[in-house]
């Protein structure tokens, strides 16, 4: 690596016309520049520059050597320019991982942005299981809920309330109107679960009285995909705890009914997770900004 630095210094001296001028450009002292040139000549065993008090001149060997050094310096400059461009304008491939349910949001969230930058490609990795960012070469991961401790960097994009939902046919089949969570103790529950059957504890807080209620249950049906749980719920097979961001439109259109709206069931935070904080390329910074703007205007999210 030291040889590469000396070659870059040599090219700068030739292009600047003197060691003093090259030193100013490189932020070095003239003596340090001279030392690099002398070291190159000692290693090669040939004279590269003829020096006088007023000027320098290339030897024959120096002329041939300069051509290669100049090529090296130009390549380094182009590489730096590529990094600057990457920092300023999105390009290449953006690898985004998200839960399966994000599929319906991908186009409205990122479509217009992608259209503005045709040189940018999107790799969308959809999986309700947690993906390792480094192994999958992920630039940005959308995560929901509580984040475990890690070395990743997380930026909160929005929050969405948890809603208890059921299909209209399920509501119509109940013997009496639902007024309290205790009435759901014997209901058929549908749940997202990735590791087999397990007891779950749900907690409610009444919006007006602040009364608390908790219920421990065993899901009758569970799936490792949130969208599957929602489909089972819409089919009338039971009740499910779903995020408002996923079902606000389904409730509005009458495909689902929000149960016990006076009882709150907590919030689900939405995060953008990246492998590192510093030196984010433009594609990552702009993608996060686009996602945050999208969630800010979406039904079912809290700003």
Image (spheres, rainbow, N blue to C red):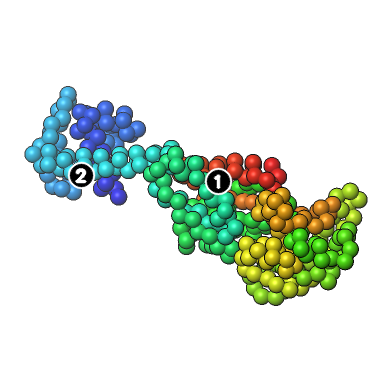
Residue 112's x, y, as percent? 49, 41
Above or below: residue 149 compared with residue 198:
above
Mark whose residue sits in front, 2 or 1: 1
Q: Describe residue 284's horizontal placement relative to residue 15 as left or right.
A: right
Q: Which residue is mark 2?
A: 40
- Of all residues, the one furthest to the bottom in this rendering is 197
Q: Mark 1: which secondary structure?
A: helix
Instruction: Give the CA separation, mark 2 to mark 1.
Output: 56 Å
**Closer to the camera in the image, 180 or 87:** 180
- Of all residues, the one furthest to the top in this rendering is 54
Q: Residue at x 20, y 28 (%)?
A: 17
Above or below: residue 147 compared with residue 91:
below
Q: Describe residue 27's horizontal placement relative to residue 152 as left or right.
A: left
> Badge 2, how many Cα within 10 Å: few under 14, some, many 20+?
some
Q: Residue at x 19, y 33 (%)?
A: 14
**Closer to the camera in the image, 25 or 53:** 25
Q: Which residue is mark 1?
A: 109
């Amino acid at each position: 690596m030291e040889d590469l630095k000396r070659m870059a210094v040599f090219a700068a001296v030739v292009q600047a016309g003197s060691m003093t001028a090259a030193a100013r450009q490189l932020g070095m002292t003239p003596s340090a520049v001279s030392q690099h040139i002398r070291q190159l000549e000692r290693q090669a065993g040939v004279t590269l520059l003829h020096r006088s008090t007023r000027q320098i001149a290339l030897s024959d060997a120096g002329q041939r050597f300069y051509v290669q050094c100049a090529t090296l310096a130009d390549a380094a400059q182009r590489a730096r320019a590529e990094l600057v461009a990457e920092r300023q304008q999105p390009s290449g491939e953006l690898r985004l991982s998200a839960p399966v349910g994000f599929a319906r949001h991908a186009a409205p969230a990122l479509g217009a942005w992608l259209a503005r930058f045709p040189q940018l490609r999107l790799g969308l990795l959809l999986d309700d299981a947690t993906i390792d960012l480094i192994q999958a070469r992920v630039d940005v991961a959308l995560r929901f809920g509580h984040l475990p401790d890690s070395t990743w960097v997380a930026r909160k994009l929005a929050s969405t309330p948890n809603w208890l939902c059921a299909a209209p046919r399920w509501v119509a089949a109940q013997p009496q109107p639902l007024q309290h969570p205790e009435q759901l103790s014997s209901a058929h529950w549908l749940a997202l679960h990735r590791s087999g059957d397990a007891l779950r504890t749900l907690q409610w807080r009444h919006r007006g009285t602040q009364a608390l209620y908790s219920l421990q249950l065993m899901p009758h049906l569970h799936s490792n995909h949130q969208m599957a749980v929602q489909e089972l719920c819409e089919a009338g097979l039971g009740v499910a705890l779903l995020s408002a961001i996923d079902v606000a439109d389904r409730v509005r259109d009458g495909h689902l009914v929000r149960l016990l709206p006076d009882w709150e069931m907590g919030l689900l935070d939405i995060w953008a997770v990246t492998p590192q904080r510093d030196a984010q390329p433009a594609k990552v910074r702009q993608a996060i900004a686009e996602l945050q703007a999208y969630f800010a205007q979406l039904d079912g999210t809290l700003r």
